[in-house]
Amino acid sequence: QVQLVESGGGLVQRGGSLRLSCAASGSIFGIRDAAWYRQTPGAQRQLVAAITSGGSTNFADSVKGRFTISRDNAKNTVYLQMNSLKPEDTAVYYCYAAVEKYQGVVSDYWGQGTQVTVAS
């Protein structure tokens, strides 16, 4: 069974950095497109950053220049490097991935969410 396992969240001071990881567990062919979303209480889940299978990236305006998304295909892992963190970045961060479990068979998966709290 495929799972996306997130790690790296926590409490950090304003201006600090965190790196989130999202690893696909189980036997898979690979990860295609992937993304990180975040959600605060009472709000809709919002896209933070996305990366295609070819490595093209896209970022929300609010994080451009501060966050970087990357991937390690050999490890089936996607990363979100967050620098210059602000209190408004506080949220639960979710990993999304289009996982190719078998060649040509792609399904959507979500991670369990990891809390990021930025203290002022």
Image (spheres, grey):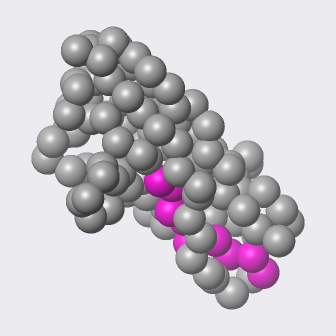
Vertical relation: 57 (above or below) 106: above
* Residue 27 coordinates in the image, percent (x, y): 85, 66
Q: Do we see residue 48 in this rendering?
A: no
Q: Which residues are magenta?
A: 94-102
Q: Residue at x 26, y 59 (%)?
A: 42
Tell whether 12 sits left or right of 48: right
Vertical relation: 45 (above or below) 9: below
Q: Quadrant of residue 104?
A: bottom right
Tell whether 20 sits left or right of 43: right
Tell whether 77 sits left or right of 62: right
92 within the magenta span: no
Q: Main secondary structure of the magenta part?
A: strand
Q: Residue at x 35, y 42 (%)?
A: 91
Q: Residue at x 52, y 42 (%)?
A: 114
Tell whether 101 sits left or right of 83: right
Vertical relation: 28 (above or below) 55: below
* Residue 94 coordinates in the image, percent (x, y): 47, 53
Q: Quadrant of residue 100?
A: bottom right
Which quadrant is home to the C terminus? top left
